[in-house]
Image (spheres, rainbow, N blue to C red):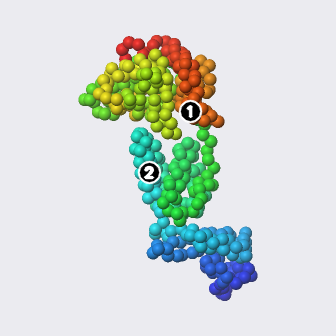
Amino acid sequence: MAQKIVTLSGPEHVGAIIDFQGIGTFPDSQVHGLYLRAGPRKASFYFHSDKQVRGERRVRRVKLGEYPAIGLIEARRLADIERGDIAAGKVTRGKNSATKIGAAFDEYLAFLKRKAEKAKKDPRWHRNATYLYKQLIEPKWSAWSLCDLVNEPALLRDWHRKLTKANGPVSANHALRLIRAAYKYAAKLDVTLPERNPCSAVEWNDEEPKQSAMPFKEFPAWLAAWNALRNTKGHNKPVRHFAPNRKEFHLFGLLTGARPGEIARLRWRDVKPSARCVEIPNAKASKTIRIIMSASIARVLKRARDITEPKNADALIFPHCEQISSRDALPYRGHDLRHTWKTVASECKVGDLFTGIMLGHMPEGVSEKYITRHVLTTGTELRAAQRKVSARIVKLLGKDPTRGKS
């Protein structure tokens, strides 16, 4: 029977353990917390620390490397680095008190909802993130601690590859981004978490932006489908079906290129008749987007007002239309119409600077102060561009849907 070596006093003892097939965990005689863990097939160096901090158990256990890839001298150097981290206060929580991924997501999802409420926006990203967590993340990782996950980056890398095959490249990327965001938020509350990106080993999938603009030849078919929609007026319908301005909602999106979520949040106080524009407050990136009204856009708004007969300026222009863009039977809707407006503007030779301003994009390298000054000095040109785009859209449709009954 091989003699068991109680402590590691030098490199030759490590070799002796391996040569004589010693199995077990052997502490180092010089560096407290350094261990050699020898098994029947391989041996690895570990650093282990177990401390009580203000009555709470905190554990740090790190694999330093496998023997003989690193020797005892290198293992001692790495262990000293770990001891320095402990002296600096970087000690992870114990297994029983470590923050679990499920708890971290509860905090993060609540934060997303508060953020939307503070901005007075529809909590759409909160809903999407909750769905993604429930469907993909919770079944696999909810019981894991954040420390376990960040210390084993290969686990997330391999899971991302499986998700890519099972759910597609975009969903896999979204799930990992959500884990990264939840970890970053949790690190603000738990200063003992390692300052590392848990997704550092992930090989991200390439994502091609969706280009779904409506071809010019399909405008008449879109108008026919739009005419087949029915505005449901009256409160005797369930709320999710009560969208009196559903047709005007889609037409406004086609004529302005505005995002569907921003259109759904518009209120009558955002319409500025004297300035002949519609302001979208607190839009993407917390900017205010100003949509210049052409005659066609003004007629859509007038029809919307006649249908709903708003009681005050706080009333929504397009009530109950938050999810209409994904439900109504139109061949192109939502962001498709935004891409369509951009395509028509390009065909009308509207420059990228004007197009960016009208869509609420900040052109690269141009300050917001300059944009405001530019809009004020070139207002007539922007109005001419909007009229040109609206006229072209009406011509492609084959009939002006803003005239006559909806």
Q: CA distance from mark 1 to mark 2?
A: 27 Å
Closer to the observer: label 1 or label 2? 1
Residue closer to the observer: 273 or 73? 273
Q: Which residue is mark 1?
A: 361
State the image coordinates of residue 310 (x, y, percent, origin top left).
31, 26
Q: Residue placed at 54% from the left, 68% from the top?
A: 92
Q: Residue placed at 46% from the left, 37% from the top?
A: 282
Camera sees residue 370: yes
Relative height, residue 78 to residue 318 (above, below): below
Q: Residue placed at 57% from the left, 68% from the top?
A: 90
Give the residue type that dot 1 points to: His
Residue closer to the observer: 256 or 278? 278
Give the residue type that dot 2 points to: Phe
Q: Residue placed at 32% from the left, 22% from the top?
A: 307
Q: Is residue 187 left or right of 66 when viewed as pictured?
A: left
The residue most toward the right is 12
The residue most toward the left is 236
Q: Is residue 116 left or right of 196 when viewed as pictured?
A: left
The tag on residue 111 is 2
Relative height, residue 6 to residue 306 (above, below): below
